Image (spheres, helix red, strand yellow):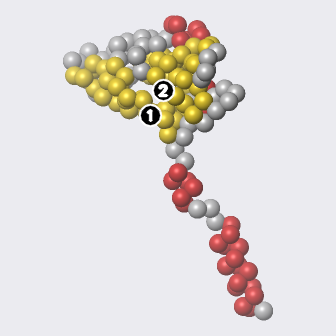
Amino acid sequence: MKKKLILSFLALTFLGCSSDDDNENQIQCEFDTLISAEQFKNAPSDQLLISDLKIENNCLKISFSSGGCDGSSWELKLIDAGEVQESDPPQRNLRLSLKNEELCLAIVNRELSFDISNLQLEGNRVQLNFANSDQRILYEY
């Protein structure tokens, strides 16, 4: 009887645990992506240079630089214009908005990640174009 109880307990323990690998494979994005025609047009647009775009799961990682001291006071938003261009693949226009009031002359490089799952359309891909850069990237899901 004791042996069956111990075996039952061990079986439940192993079957009830989630794998740490599942948690390690989930990427947490730092910020959400806004969809707003008004903010796309009117949000701050201080100068920045986008150097690289990468998508991992539903996170868009944007590497960029701007002038400043250390970037700690920067306010950033990734904003979608709220319109879809019907093409193959369909396209969305985005803008990385920066409010930068730092007065230092250093060039500061940063990488931020944004959850872009709310940009998905019917089908399995969408082209993301950046209005304040010549960068674009294909988002496949």
Query: Residue 10's quadrant in the figure?
Result: bottom right
Single out the residue that lies furthest toward the right: 1
Q: Name which residue lies at 57% across and 34% down.
A: 140
Q: Is residue 35 visible?
A: no
Instruction: Looking at the image, tell me whether mark 1 or mark 2 is earlier in sequence order.
Output: 1
In the rendered structure, are the residues bearing label 1 and label 2 in contact, judged by CB atoms less than 8 Å apart? yes
Residue 135's place in the image compared with 1, above or below, is above
Quadrant the N terminus occupies: bottom right
Q: Name which residue lies at 55% across and 48% down.
A: 26
- Which residue has dot 1 on it? 54
Q: Secondary structure at mark 1?
A: strand
Number of the front mark, 1 or 2: 2
Amino acid at the residue labelled 1: Lys
Q: Is residue 10 visible?
A: yes
Q: Name which residue lies at 52% across and 28% down.
A: 138
Residue 141's place in the image compared with 133, above or below, is below
Near mark 2 (Cα within 10 A), the count class, few <14, some 14-19 or many ≥20, is some
Near mark 1 (Cα within 10 A), the count class, few <14, some 14-19 or many ≥20, is some
Where residue 95 appears, x then y in whole percent? 48, 17
Where residue 34 appears, x then y in whole percent? 57, 21
Quadrant the C terminus occupies: top right
- Mark 1–mark 2 Cα distance, whole angstroms, equals 8 Å
Q: Name which residue lies at 38% across and 29% down.
A: 52
- Which residue has dot 2 on it? 137
Where residue 104 appears, x then y in whole percent? 23, 18
